[in-house]
Amino acid sequence: MKNQHMKLIQILLCLLLFPCYNFAQIKLQWREQYPGIWKATVGQPEKISLLSAAGASANVAALAKLPKSSFPLNQAEIGVKLIDHKVYLRFPLDQAEQLFGLGLNFQTVNQRGRILDLHVDHYGGKDNGRTHAPVPFYVSSKGYGVLIDAARYLTVYAGTGVRRESQHPPVLYDRNTNKEWDAQPYSDAVEILVPAEGVTLYVFAGPTPMQAVQRYNLMNGGGYLPPKWGLGFTQRVPTLYTQDDILKEATSFEEHNFPLDFIGVEPGWHSMSYPCTFEWDPSRFPDPKGFLDALAKKGLSANLWLNPYVSPKASLYPKIKPLSGSHTVWNGIVPDFTLPQTRQLFKDHFMKNHLAIGVGGYKVDEVDGYDFWVWPDVATFPSGFSAEQMRQVYGNLVQSMTASWYKEINKRTYGLVRASNAGSSNFPYVIYNDYYSHKDFITALVNSSFIGVLWTPEVRASKTAEEWVRRMQSVCFSPMAMLNAWADGTKPWSFPEVEKAVNEVASLRMQLLPYLYSTFAQYHFEGKPPFRAMNLVEGFGFTATNTAGQLDATANPYAMSIKKDIKDQYMMGDCLLVAPMFAGESSREVYLPAGKWYDFYTGAFVGENQKISISPALDKIPLFVKDGGIIPMIPTRRQAPKAGEILQLEVRHYGESTGSFQLYDDDGVSFDYEKGVYSFTRLAVSKSSDGNLQGELPTFPVSKPFGYNKMVKWVYMTKGRE
Ligand code: GAL
């Protein structure tokens, strides 16, 4: 009896001392929302989330084609608590699991063992969660994914915290006498702090990491299919260029016989910018329509730079003012794009002054921010959403708004953006930034594949011809082949000694357009990212390792270990492995997945399930094709094919095995493919009765777009060498 009294007093004391604390574990109800995707809500989710700001709708039919799966985690091991108005989440981890994703990271691939404060920001040189697309989605090497759909600054402990009650505690070592002692002892969980009273969670089944990513992308509408011209080369001209300067620039590309499909117009087209008016400057652009028409005659379209902060000199200013936030950015007001009235005003202005006269797209700058100039976290917005929420979704809001205008006029666009977040797979935008480490740019390209975003390792300037050609090679094997000359005025031929090599790689990209466009179609219809981390390749055995760090009283007093990742090579589509070279390096290692691999240029066998060392010439970016790989190509050309053009196909086969490839085609410019106006043609190489490889006669599509000559030329790259 006495004991019972004591217990009661203890409980009452607890309730009195912690009135708003609820330590109770919350039991989640997981519901299969789409095939292989489970959703659960904790508490009261907020009115705005990353996915709601993106506004995508799932491609349920494509999701249904993926293998049926059961819930990939042990539900009993998922911990959820609501404490102090925050959600505490815990997901289990196995010993050997690696974690990928968690934002657009630039230096690391496997995020296990890291702490990330996911916060939309420019990239400041450290993988700490502050980045252009801090997507709170991770994919495990075990083949499942987890998404936390909260428009908040989330803290993710990706296998760092060690709970006293852990079922899999780390081994106890004596630091001074045992070499196994680790400053970061083994942790068996991902723990996430969500500063909100509720949140929506999603768990994605695999069974492979690629399939978990596919489900994520398909839930967000499938990846974006760019217009064909978007996959050609693009040059961004210097600030303050006039319409005549730009037309001259276009002519110089013709004179140098260099590919060019669209031109980026940097600050200078607005009558004032930083903040922007979104109105053409009458002295530099006296005749915007005439200018755009003249570009169109050259087969080119224009992409306009902007940031969304409205100048007091803009005609939009008085109308947007009551619909904007409490703080300014460079004296411009910050539109609250969550409000339909704001979006309508922008739409009216942009449709009339830009889209109606042929503007092809936008470069949405500065939506990532830098704390010293973007709105502070104490800013308020008329919608009532907080500055923090706005920061996390602003990029998504602008992308979704501008994309919808192009959808409405049934014209595909392809542009640039500096901030994105979860839910953006279907946006017509590629992320870029002002950072410039070539190696880190490639790691960002690798990491973009885990989180449903596209990234370009843009070229701006270089110290040497070697660096120039190496950077140009990488950017030609990325989602957007772009030279951004806004500050430096560089041209592809700025280093005459490598002009030929630079032209060759840009031309090779053009030749590969049928392969690349079909790869993007895979992104759209199946959710497979076009540029892929090696860790998404089925059967790729490499595991990131931790190597012991040097003990040092100042720099590394706890001998923190160092991670080794595969972060400088990637796949373009199913068949092509890209291993870029960097200035100052004449050789490098390449990890080849299981199966035989062949040199793209010669068809020669290079290795199989192994690490190889290569010393390529300066004029070639190392490219390898998997056994049975089929690469459809077209003759080199300066511009992507226009609707109705008929091109000669050269279909290359590599290796000894049979293989097939689904060649995609449509009009290349409209959204009619969403109504079934497209074709997939199976290009296959089989073996004849005497064991010889032979290209099969494809079944050509009837009454569907197909821009190729039916006389397919087969080239056996490996067989031909023997
Ligand atoms: C930067 C942007 C650059 C360029 C420049 C023009 O913010 O990252 O690519 O557009 O603005 O002022």
Image (cartoon, helix red, strand yellow):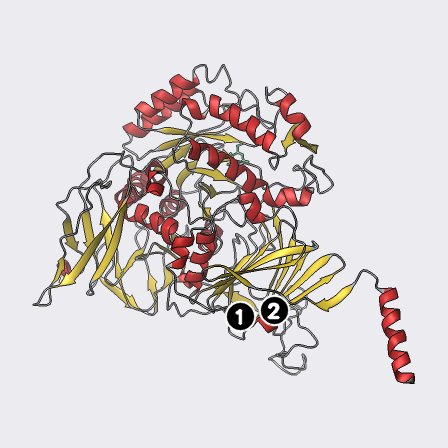
Toward the left, the furthest residue is 690
Q: Is residue 118 left or right of residue 416?
A: right
The x, y position of residue 184, in whole percent, is 63, 71
Indicate the position of residue 95 as horizontal and vertical percent values: 54, 75
In the displayed structure, 418 sits above or below 222; it is above
**Could you say which is closer to the camera, residue 100 or residue 3?**
3
What distance separates the C-alpha of mark 2 from that of mark 1?
Answer: 8 Å
* 240 and 678: which is toward the camera: 678
Q: Please, what secondary structure does the residue beneath circle 1 have?
A: loop
**Residue 188 x, y percent position in the rendering:** 60, 73
Q: Quick check: marks 2 and 1 in contact, CB under 8 Å? A: yes
To which residue does mark 1 refer? Answer: 73
Which residue type carries mark 1? Leu
The three-letter amino acid code for the residue at tag 2 is Ile
**In which quarter of the view is residue 398 placed?**
top right
Q: Is residue 571 above or below residue 123?
A: below
Above or below, 314 against 100 in this view is above
The residue at 54%/20% (across/down) is 271
Looking at the rendered structure, the secondary structure element under dot 2 is loop
User: Residue 44, percent across and down?
Assistant: 68, 54
Determine whether, in the image, residue 130 is placed left or right of residue 637: right
